[in-house]
Image (spheres, grey):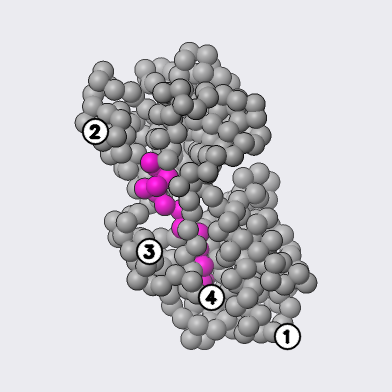
Amino acid sequence: MMVRKRSFLTGLLASTVIAATSFGAAAGDGKRIAFFVSDLSNVFHQSQAAEAKRYAAEKYGAEVVVFDGQADSAVMTQNVDQVAAGAFDGATLHIWDAEAAAPGVREALDEGIVMTSFFSPITDTGVPTARSDEAGVSFEMGAQMAKAWKDAHPDKPIVMVQLGWPNHTEVNSGRTNPFAAGVLSVDPAAENLGALDSSKGQEAAKQIIVDLLTQRPEVNLIYSEASNLTVGTMAGLSQLGRGKFDNGSPLTEIVASVDFDSVEFDSIYDPNSSLKVSMGLPPVETAQGRIDLIMDVIKGDVATSTDPAEEFFYKAYTISYWSMDQDDAKSWLSAQFGE
């Protein structure tokens, strides 16, 4: 499902070509689309890239070439130049440094190459942006966690924290802020310690949790805003003798994550683990939405650039110990990742 929404743009761009595979139509028979992912070692992006190739060929007779950003903003930015050099009709971008990439995007637009972005807008270029509808899921996870904690510990005040990217506009609007709002909708008196910068990854998240809970052991709701951070978060909790439920009831805290996968599946449906909810971002539906959007621009159904830019939102899922049956979660994984 897609929801159209207008908003101002903020950031994005490019990557290094790691795979170029033509399905169905040759470049001369259809459009040639550059499909950017931030890190092809991530299973979400692997599945997304594979589906983009299949779907573009089957529905549009288009060739998709995948650009891997290698989790490096400099690599992503360098690859913008390859779009203009590679005889592409369009590019759907996923980048981290919008300011650095914006000149390359403008140059491509000037050369008649259609540009769209994924996750983050690209400064003031006005190109259409595809985003997952993360805010609704983050709110729901916060509300579910707050209710579960209050049901189990009505006399213990809620103290929440988020681990992520406090200076990232889209992370704040899709994850940090709506999560806190969800918690506060259940318990207006909950204390919010805010978002702690965990941008250095898994080990940083682990150390942040150890340091924070040594000083503030009363923290009981934790939103770890990416799956790699959650690995560190849970390791830190384990080091402190925490991370525990007792047959579905929280003992020490409740943890939420993003990027639900088969590893998180085992923890979420383990009645003795404190990881209990995660945002399911569907690679199949996301890839299809990104391809549909860029083809709509190419066909003239969506404007190449607007002020403010248009944002197009695609469904995300609440994977929850409390609200999604385990078999349904397994089916979701199978449909999205083939697991």
Which disc, if any, is residue 23? 2
Q: Secondary structure at mark 4?
A: loop
Residue 37 location (% of width, % of height):
43, 39
Q: Secondary structure at mark 3?
A: helix
Q: Nearer the viewer, residue 15 or 140?
A: 140
Mark-to-mark CA distance, 1 and 2: 59 Å
Q: Secondary structure at mark 2?
A: loop
Relative to 7, 243 lies left or right: left
* Magenta part of the chain: 274-288
Crowd around label 1: few <14 · some 14–19 · many ≥20 (10 Å): few
Crowd around label 4: few <14 · some 14–19 · many ≥20 (10 Å): many
Q: Earlier in the sequence, mark 4 or mark 1?
A: 1
Residue drawn 61% across and 61% down? 139
Residue drawn 55% across and 28% down? 127
Q: Nearer the viewer, residue 302 or 27?
A: 302
Q: Secondary structure at mark 1?
A: loop
Of labels 3 and 2, the one closer to you: 2
Residue drawn 58% across and 64% down? 140
Residue 320 location (% of width, % of height):
49, 69
Amino acid type at mark 1: Asp
Residue 57 visible in the picture: yes
Residue located beneath label 3 in the image: 262
Mark-to-mark CA distance, 4 and 1: 19 Å
Q: Eyeballing the image, is 139 above or below 51?
A: below
Residue located beneath label 4 in the image: 274
Amino acid type at mark 2: Phe
Residue located beneath label 1 in the image: 155
Relative to 285, 63 lies left or right: left
Q: Eyeballing the image, is 267 above or below 139?
A: below
Mark-to-mark CA distance, 3 and 2: 28 Å
